[in-house]
Image (tube, helix red, strand yellow):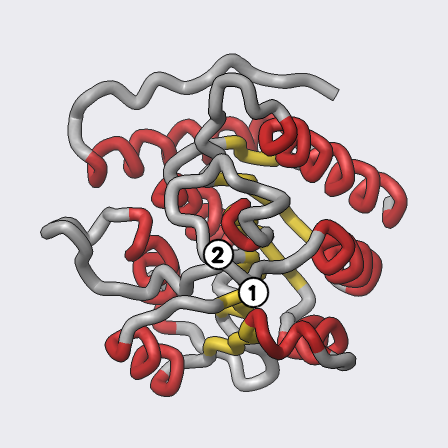
Amino acid sequence: MCTLPSIDLGTVGPELAIARLRALYDDLLEAAGDRFIIGLGGEHSISSAPAVAWADRLGGDLTILQFDAHTDLRDRHHDSPWNHACVMRRVLEHRPDGVSRADAADIVAVGIRALTREERDVIRENRVEVVFAHEMRRPGWVERAVEALGENVYITFDVDFFDPSLMPATGTPEPGGGSWWDALDLLSRVFGARNVVGADIVELAPRRGEEASAFTAAKLAYKMIGFWSERR
């Protein structure tokens, strides 16, 4: 197990930064062999680079499992298509050769409790399965999420999926989020039933004097490594 040095993407602007991150991730995949890579970041916009890298590698045979309070399906936000609120829209648009499978969703989003009318329309017009946070109060939501996934899965975990009482150190907290056990229940099922190719954990905004959030994010990465190792 190793932790690589943090990546300095410079001040070239978000689009070029994402392109540079994609090139670096492609190189890392070549060097890593069959190792499991977890990206750690603040901005959720970084997730588009590894997600589309895996989509290209697998010829589109990939579902993104998104843990999040927000759908992040806006076309633009704050005059940028590369804003963190647009990341899943960019991923959704990047289907290799326009591939969209009939047997699985392109995105399965879990824990959602905030979206715009524009995003609602995108969901209805595409293969996006949403498990809203209030639906997680009833049984059966884990099975529904797993059934919507294809064989190959990339996980992007925005820590604002968690209720702010568990994860206050994030940029856009929303009340009514998931619990630690909700996350582990779904993760354990997905790692056991599907081929999880990679993952990232994003949107942690550490606060001086409040260490529980950072520890929770670190423990989440630790659990993912454990679930992946257990399947192997």
Q: Position of residue 118 (x, y in %)?
A: 25, 76
Q: Three-letter amino acid code at disc 1? A: Gly
Q: Which residue is mark 2?
A: 55
Within 10 Å of the Cα at label 2, are there few (<14), some (14-19), or many (20+) other Cα atoms? many
Quarter of the view holding residue 19: top left
Residue 51, compared with residue 13, is above or below; it is below
Dividing the image into 4 quarters, which one contains the C terminus? Answer: top right
Q: Position of residue 122 (x, y in %)?
A: 32, 78
Q: Three-letter amino acid code at disc 2? A: Ala
Extreme residue in the left direction: 79
| N-term mark: 1 or 2 | 2
Q: Residue at x 30, y 22 (%)?
A: 9
State the SS at label 1.
strand
Q: Nearer the viewer, residue 142 or 12?
A: 142
Residue 205, compared with residue 192, is above or below; it is above
Q: CA distance from mark 1 to mark 2?
A: 23 Å
Q: Residue at x 34, y 80 (%)?
A: 120
Q: Which mark is residue 111?
A: 1
Q: Does residue 214 appear left or right of residue 101 in this picture? A: right
Q: Inspect this view and state whether residue 195 appears.
A: no
Q: Residue at x 19, y 55 (%)?
A: 77
Q: Nearer the viewer, residue 184 or 91?
A: 184
Q: Residue at x 38, y 59 (%)?
A: 88
Q: Position of residue 47 (x, y in %)?
A: 43, 45
Q: Inspect this view and state whether residue 209 appears.
A: yes
Dividing the image into 4 quarters, which one contains the N terminus? Answer: top right
Quarter of the view holding residue 103: bottom right
Q: Nearer the viewer, residue 84 or 190?
A: 84
State the SS at label 2.
helix
